[in-house]
């Protein structure tokens, strides 16, 4: 009775600590996701005759090393004939080398949104979940053959990534050095996966040691649980958000080791168990 009473404060304290940590993680992830949509606002709005560009990161494909950038181009002042819906003269958006397309809008025609592909640099997806991707983006507007002022607003809508940027305007060109990292929710879940895989591997190793050290023989429920864990971890790893390829950092941190430990444990339990069963039969 005394032992139970002594343990109760520790149990309550541990429960409070777990709840507090969970609340801190939730608040941190929520604050990051709720405030991280707008990345940068660059260029002057002082000139009435300018081109506003609303650029949105729609999707980051880290596996192929590209992101999809959606551009909404709005000419202002004397550059438009329909309150921003169409340009008065031919309008072309010149981009940097990382952007694969230079959007062109003929005079008098309505301007649609345009999706362009942007080549990514950085570590690559194999550094998941700590991968970092960069994209230098430069946008210049040419209206009727002459360069005009540009105002750029860049936002991020890919929930799997958080974005930050350094931006400035130079010679009527909006320049953005964009950096993308895994969002707080993805990073938190990936770290949880690493911890969970190691915990399962340690649990199987502990069970195997118990069966082998006590010469229990072939304990089929234990073997079934170990084998099921071996395959369950593979499915669990494939559920990683962002679908990192095999051979990513997360595999070297946990998955490969967990699979190896569990496989060795199953083999050891079977080998020792067969020996024990034969001894009993003799």
Image (tube, rainbow, N blue to C red):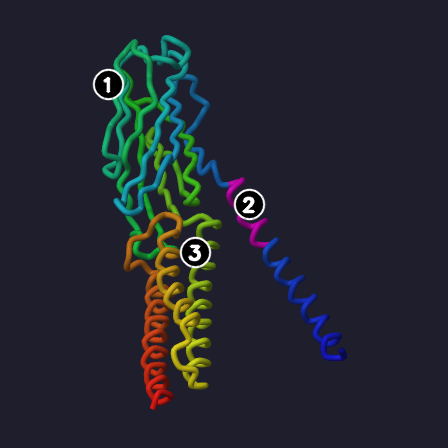
Q: Which of the two labelled residues, at mark 2 and mark 3, occupies the earlier sequence position?
A: 2
**Disc on the earlier residue, 2 or 1:** 2
Q: Which residue is mark 3?
A: 190
Q: Which mark is residue 30?
A: 2
Neighbour class for label 1 at 10 Å: few (<14), some, many (≥20)? few
- Among the 4 quarters of the image, the one containing residue 44: top left
Q: Nearest the camera: 153 or 28? A: 28
* Residue 59 among those drawn in magenta: no
Using residue 259 as the reference point, say whether residue 102 is left or right of it: left
Q: Position of residue 24 (x, y in %)?
A: 60, 54
Cα distance in 3D space between marks 2 and 3: 17 Å
Of marks 2 and 1, the one in the foreground: 2
> Distance of mark 3 from mark 1, alpha carbons?
50 Å
- Please say whether residue 30 is one of the residues in the magenta stretch: yes
Nearer the observer: mark 2 or 3; the answer is 3
How many residues crowd around disc 3 within 10 Å: few (fewer than 14), some, or many (20 or more)?
Answer: many
**Residue at image location 31% in from the left, 58% down from the top:** 248
Q: Secondary structure at mark 1?
A: loop
Residue 182, compared with residue 53, is above or below; it is: below
Across and down, in percent, residue 127 comes to: 33, 57
Mark 3 vs mark 1: in front:
3
Q: Main secondary structure of the magenta part?
A: helix
Q: Quadrant of the N terminus?
A: bottom right
Taking depth in this image into account, of 230 and 67 the one nearest to the observer is 230
Q: Which residues are magenta?
A: 24-35
Q: Position of residue 112 (x, y in %)?
A: 33, 19
What's the CA distance linking mark 2 and mark 1? Answer: 46 Å
Q: Which mark is residue 145?
A: 1
């Amino acid at each position: 009775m005394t032992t139970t009473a002594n343990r109760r404060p520790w149990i309550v304290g541990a429960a409070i600590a777990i709840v507090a940590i969970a609340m801190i993680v939730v608040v941190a992830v929520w604050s990051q996701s709720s405030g991280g949509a707008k990345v940068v606002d660059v260029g002057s709005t002082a000139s009435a005759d300018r081109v506003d560009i609303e650029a949105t990161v729609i999707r980051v494909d880290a596996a192929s090393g590209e992101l999809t950038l959606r551009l909404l181009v709005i000419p202002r002042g004397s550059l438009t004939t329909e309150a921003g819906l169409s340009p008065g003269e031919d309008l072309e958006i010149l981009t940097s080398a990382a952007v694969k397309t230079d959007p062109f809008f003929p005079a008098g025609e309505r301007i649609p949104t345009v999706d362009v592909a942007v080549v990514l640099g950085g570590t690559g997806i194999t550094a998941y979940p700590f991968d970092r991707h960069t994209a230098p983006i430069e946008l210049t507007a040419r209206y009727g053959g002459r360069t005009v002022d540009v105002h750029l607003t860049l936002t991020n809508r890919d929930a799997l990534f958080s974005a930050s940027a350094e931006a400035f305007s130079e010679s009527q060109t909006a320049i953005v050095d964009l950096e993308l990292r895994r969002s707080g929710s993805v990073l938190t879940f990936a770290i949880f996966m690493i911890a969970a895989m190691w915990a399962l591997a340690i649990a199987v190793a502990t069970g195997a040691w118990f069966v082998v050290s006590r010469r229990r023989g072939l304990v089929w429920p234990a073997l079934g649980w170990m084998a099921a864990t071996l395959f369950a971890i593979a499915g669990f790893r494939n559920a990683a958000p962002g679908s990192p390829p095999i051979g990513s950092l997360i595999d070297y941190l946990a998955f490969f080791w967990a699979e190896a430990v569990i496989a060795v444990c199953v083999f050891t339990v079977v080998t020792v168990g067969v020996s024990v069963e034969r001894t009993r039969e003799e």
